[in-house]
Amino acid sequence: MHHSHPYSQKKAEELWQAVLRLKTKEECRRFFRDLCTIQEMTAMADRWQAVKKINDNEPYRDIAKQVGMSSTTVARVAYWLNHGQGGYRLMLKKLKLL
């Protein structure tokens, strides 16, 4: 996040409203593909894979190797899983993975 471009709650709320209208995987794929770069999509997909593996108590080093991210990034994902807003856990529960 750039300091010259502060996080806007109003802009974020408008994005969340749009995301809530997505109904299918195909709609999600199309919307996020237009919204995000391939690198952003890959980073989000990798983080979600890491969340599932952390939840399964896989060692961070193994996760980093399997997912293709640094151990530092795996630790950061684990931090947000354990000390974030509860969003990862909410989705793990919704998907019956928790």
Image (cartoon, helix red, strand yellow):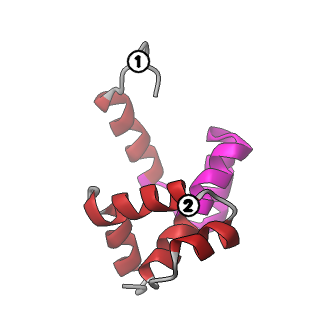
Residue 11 lies, in percent from the top left, at 38, 29
Label 1 sits on what residue type? His
Q: Residue at x 64, y 41 (%)?
A: 36
| Amino acid at the residue labelled 2 | Ser
Q: Is residue 66 left or right of residue 98?
A: right
Within 10 Å of the Cα at label 2, are there few (<14), some (14-19), or many (20+) other Cα atoms? some
Q: Nearer the viewer, mark 2 or mark 1?
A: 2
For marks 2 and 1, the one nearer the N-term is 1
Residue 5 x %, y %: 43, 17
Queried whether the magenta region covers residue 75, the answer comes back as no
Pick the quarter of the image with the C terminus: bottom left
Query: Which image quarter: residue 91?
Result: bottom left
Q: Position of residue 59 (x, y in %)?
A: 52, 78
Task: Give, as a single range, the part of the protein colored magenta.
Answer: 20-47
Residue 22: mark: none
Residue at label 1?
3
Q: Is residue 55 left or right of residue 39?
A: left
- Which residue reaches farthest top? 4
Q: Are marks 2 and 1 in contact (CB under 8 Å)?
A: no
Of residues 69 and 89, the one drawn nearer to the viewer in this rendering = 69
60 or 94: which is nearer to us?
60
Circle 2 is placed at which residue position?
71
